[in-house]
Amino acid sequence: MSLAETFAPVRVRAPGKINVFLEVGYLQDDGYHELATAFQAVSLFEDVVASPAEGFSMAVTGSVALDGVPVDDRNLALRAARLLAAETGYEGGVHLDVHKQVPVAGGMGGGSADAAAALVACDALWETGLSSTDLQRLAARLGADVPFALMGGTAIGAGRGDRLSPALARGRFDWVLVVSDEGVSTPAVYGELDRHRERHRVDIGPIRDVPEVDADVLHALRAGDARMLASSLRNDLQAATLHLRPDLAPVLEQGEEWGALAGIVSGSGPTLAFLCGSPQEALDLQTRLSGAGHEALHVHGPVPGARVVP
Ligand code: C5P
């Protein structure tokens, strides 16, 4: 029997995310910043199909610009597959077909979602049968946002953002995303934040040793209250991203003028996320922003993490 006859391809879907709260603490010796974040997984998905193969290979398609997405071992999805094989002693390979909806280098964890999906897909394809704790541990080794793409829903992240605890959340939150043609580099945004803090040390005030998610954010998520969440959104990376991408500032203002409860840079950006009061309000905002020439998408959260789909 050939490989292809033994194992049928496995399709896994993993979500992009928005950080509804992101407090950035000090830079640590490992090159990462101590964080406190609240993640919400949203209905923009990466699909990864894992098929039996002798070696390790991949191809990428998508509804977003794919410039700069590598299809070799620099790609986190392929690294995830190799890591799982090495950890479990699996001797075969895999071919990954990745279909992207999450903007590339957009601050929504698209590459991390690919890695999470690849872990789940290869685990199912190879019947390696790892526990979710084992998969979470491997995910954390691949990148700070990979564990959340596995878990999905709503969660609090500590440490690098990879030490997760699920958060209670009720209801549905409607968002309009404005996608940029060009991505930004996450390390460049963190570097800009460090320089900004150095320059403006007095104005910024103390940075907490142990950042913590505001109680108001947790309350708003628990209550499913978009208005309350809008008034407590926070992203410490936003000023740094806007410094690198000043063209985004007027768009943020425009979205709020045109009916969003609040707008925020998603993660390290440059995707902008506008929280809306209802699905209809989101649709109206999407229409106005699209009419003004922006690429605007209507999504909702929370949605589940990486899982096998038919
Ligand atoms: O883990 P990931 O590859 O997503 O992180 C990309 C980069 O973002 C890191 O190399 C680091 O420069 C920066 N980062 C950070 N602190 C974090 C997460 C990411 O400084 N908690």
Image (cartoon, helix red, strand yellow):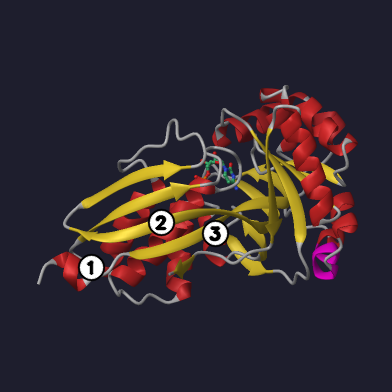
Q: Is residue 58 above or below residue 217?
A: above
Q: How crowded is mark 3: few (under 14 residues within 10 Å), some or many (20 or more)?
A: many
Q: Mark 3 = which residue? A: 149
At horizontal 50% and vertical 51% (from top left) the residue drawn is 112
Q: Is residue 172 visible?
A: yes
**Where does residue 35 sit, x and y in percent of width and height?**
67, 51
Frontmost residue, 242 versus 165:
242
| Magenta range | 218-223
Q: Mark 2 = which residue? A: 48
Q: Mark 1 = which residue? A: 89
Please tell me whether mark 1 or mark 3 is closer to you in this view.
Answer: 3
Ligand 1 under 8 Å from disc 2 Cβ:
no
**Where does residue 195 sit, x and y in percent of width and height?**
67, 27
Of labels 3 and 2, earlier in sequence is: 2
Say what amino acid the circle numbered 1 marks. Gly
Side (left or right) of 134 relative to 274 = left
**Where does residue 146 sit, x and y in percent of width and height?**
51, 56
Say what amino acid the circle numbered 3 marks. Ala
Of helix, strand and loop, which one carries label 1?
Answer: loop
Of labels 2 and 1, earlier in sequence is: 2
